[in-house]
Image (cartoon, helix red, strand yellow):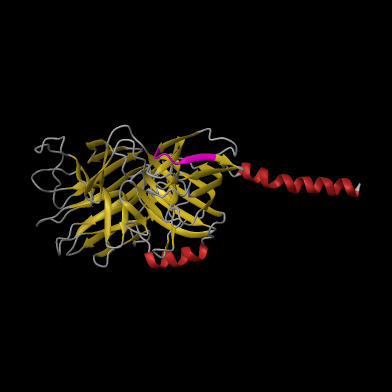
């Protein structure tokens, strides 16, 4: 009886990890035997299966090579193990794409053209380069498009990143990587250590791919190996990232600071103080008076929410000063860096062109609606001075609608940003004071 009980206990212990793995929601990307579900693009490096791992081997005189999943993914947690020759650069693409025709992107005010057939998109780097004294593995690189994001355009200290990377990496041994993507939030871990934590909304969906970097004329074959590739897809609602930083997209299932009312609306401004809001700038004055938020500044700045939102209905009211030049707006799905806020804005424009309720891409592309495809004399609404103006914004997927005082002014499709902060703008007209009230949001499932 004792022996049977011990055997049963051992079987239970043996089976537990498999059961827990299934409950975690991860599914394998690689069956350990074949390359079913994958296809090669780019260069002609060799990919094969050996001892339960995918092995990529360099060949001379070819471009970067990519073994890509046939399926695309949007929000997910990706995990894998890799081992690499110390002389080879490599990485794992995510939210990446390849097209039969040339593709054009607008990045930080610059137009970037990607050639037909070129794999491009986010890459979790395998970059251990003692020659340049750089250990940037698990950094995030925008392959074929704009270069380093982290460390780089989206944050990170290069020197500190190298210092940490040199300690964490295990040269020519198996290393474990975790990549988390939810909305514009991207987080990477290497061997259990947080590496990159950034926000970037250039691409919302794409395939996973294994890169063998080009080696020029070098004849000696260099190798990289991957195993235990698995992915857990997250609900397409901006669900909170597991093990990520506290800044995440809010959904209807989250617990907000203010409880939703019977219709699902959540108050973003409590009418008493600026709880739930912050100023990412070193300047700009914000205060609460008579149940309204007041903004004053000699330079343009934005007050933004502490939380991010993905799909939602948003309502707010703006009052412009009674005299003098003014301009304002409601930011949504926007990004907030130190001294910089950028992204979608529902315009508040009291000028004679009357574009209140138009859609403006603050800090990037400029006017989306009215834009180059719309007549310059197209009138929406002229914002009145000294009166409350009601905004109603609906953002669901790539569909954006704006209503001013219950009149629809914008009906537009754009997939640049899937989630982000809500913000209110002071345009920088010195002593002019802008007022905001009745700000509330209803997350959409």
Of 207 and 387, which appears nearest the observer? Answer: 207
Provide residue 189's location: percent of width, then percent of height.
49, 56
Identify the residue at horizontal 50%, vertical 49% (top origin): 224
- Specify the farthest residue to the front: 219
- Please tell me whether residue 322 belongs to the stretch shown in magenta: no
Of 208 and 215, which appears nearest the observer? Answer: 215
Provide residue 204's location: percent of width, then percent of height.
38, 42
Of 89 and 281, which appears nearest the observer? Answer: 89
Asked if residue 395 lies left or right of residue 355, the reply is: right
Quadrant position of residue 306:
bottom left
Answer whether residue 28 is visible to the viewer in this image: no
Of 235 and 133, which appears nearest the observer? Answer: 133
Answer whether residue 82 is visible to the viewer in this image: yes
Asked if residue 343 lies left or right of residue 220, the reply is: left
Asked if residue 150 lies left or right of residue 47, the reply is: left
Q: How many marks?
A: 0
Q: In this picture, which residue range is highlighted in magenta?
A: 42-48
Asked if residue 231 lies left or right of residue 266, the reply is: right
Provide residue 357's location: percent of width, then percent of height.
20, 42
Provide residue 181's location: percent of width, then percent of height.
44, 48
Identify the residue at horizontal 35%, vertical 60% (top origin): 155
- In the rendered image of this protein, does residue 7 appear above or below residue 160? above
Split into 4 quadrants, where in the image is the C terminus?
top left
Identify the residue at horizontal 54%, vertical 44% (top origin): 229
Identify the residue at horizontal 13%, vertical 48% (top origin): 350
Quadrant position of residue 435:
bottom left
Quadrant position of residue 118:
top left
């Amino acid at each position: 009886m004792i022996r049977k009980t011990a055997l049963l206990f051992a079987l239970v212990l043996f089976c537990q990890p498999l059961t827990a793995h299934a409950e975690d929601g991860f599914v394998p990307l690689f069956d350990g035997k074949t390359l079913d579900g994958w296809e090669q693009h780019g260069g002609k490096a060799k990919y094969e299966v050996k001892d339960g791992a995918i092995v990529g081997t360099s060949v001379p005189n070819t471009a970067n090579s990519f073994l890509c999943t046939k399926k695309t993914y949007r929000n997910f947690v990706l995990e894998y193990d890799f081992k690499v020759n110390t002389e080879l650069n490599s990485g794992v693409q995510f939210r990446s794409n390849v097209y039969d025709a040339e593709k054009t992107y607008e990045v930080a005010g610059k137009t970037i053209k990607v050639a037909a057939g070129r794999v491009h998109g986010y890459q979790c780097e395998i970059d251990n380069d003692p020659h340049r004294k750089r250990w940037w593995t698990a950094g995030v690189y925008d392959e074929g498009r704009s270069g380093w994001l982290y460390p780089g355009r989206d944050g990170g200290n290069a020197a500190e990143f190298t210092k940490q990377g040199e300690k964490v990496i295990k040269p020519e041994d198996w290393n474990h990587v975790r990549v988390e993507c939810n909305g514009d939030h991207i987080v990477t871990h290497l061997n259990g250590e947080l590496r990159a934590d950034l926000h970037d909304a250039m691409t919302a969906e794409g395939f996973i791919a294994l890169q063998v970097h080009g080696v020029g004329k070098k004849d000696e074959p260099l190798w990289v190996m991957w195993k235990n590739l698995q992915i857990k897809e997250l609900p397409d609602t901006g669900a909170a990232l597991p093990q990520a930083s506290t800044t995440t997209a809010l959904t209807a299932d989250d617990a907000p600071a203010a409880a939703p009312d019977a219709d699902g609306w959540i108050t973003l401004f409590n009418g008493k103080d600026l709880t739930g809001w912050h100023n990412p700038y070193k300047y700009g004055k914000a205060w609460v008076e008579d149940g309204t938020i007041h903004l004053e500044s000699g330079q343009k700045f934005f007050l933004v929410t502490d939380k991010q939102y993905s799909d939602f209905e948003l309502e707010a009211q703006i009052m412009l000063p009674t005299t003098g030049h003014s301009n304002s707006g409601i930011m949504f799905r926007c990004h907030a860096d130190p001294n910089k806020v950028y992204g979608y804005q529902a315009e508040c424009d009291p000028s004679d062109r009357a574009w209140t309720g138009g859609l403006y891409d603050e800090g990037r592309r400029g006017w989306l609606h009215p834009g180059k495809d719309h007549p310059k004399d197209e009138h929406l609404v002229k914002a009145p001075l000294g009166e409350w103006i009601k905004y109603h914004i609906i953002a669901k997927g790539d569909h954006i609608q704006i209503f001013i005082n219950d009149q629809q002014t914008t009906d537009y499709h754009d997939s640049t940003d899937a989630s982000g902060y809500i913000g209110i703008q002071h345009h920088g007209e010195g002593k002019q004071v802008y007022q905001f009230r009745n700000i509330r949001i209803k997350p959409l499932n």
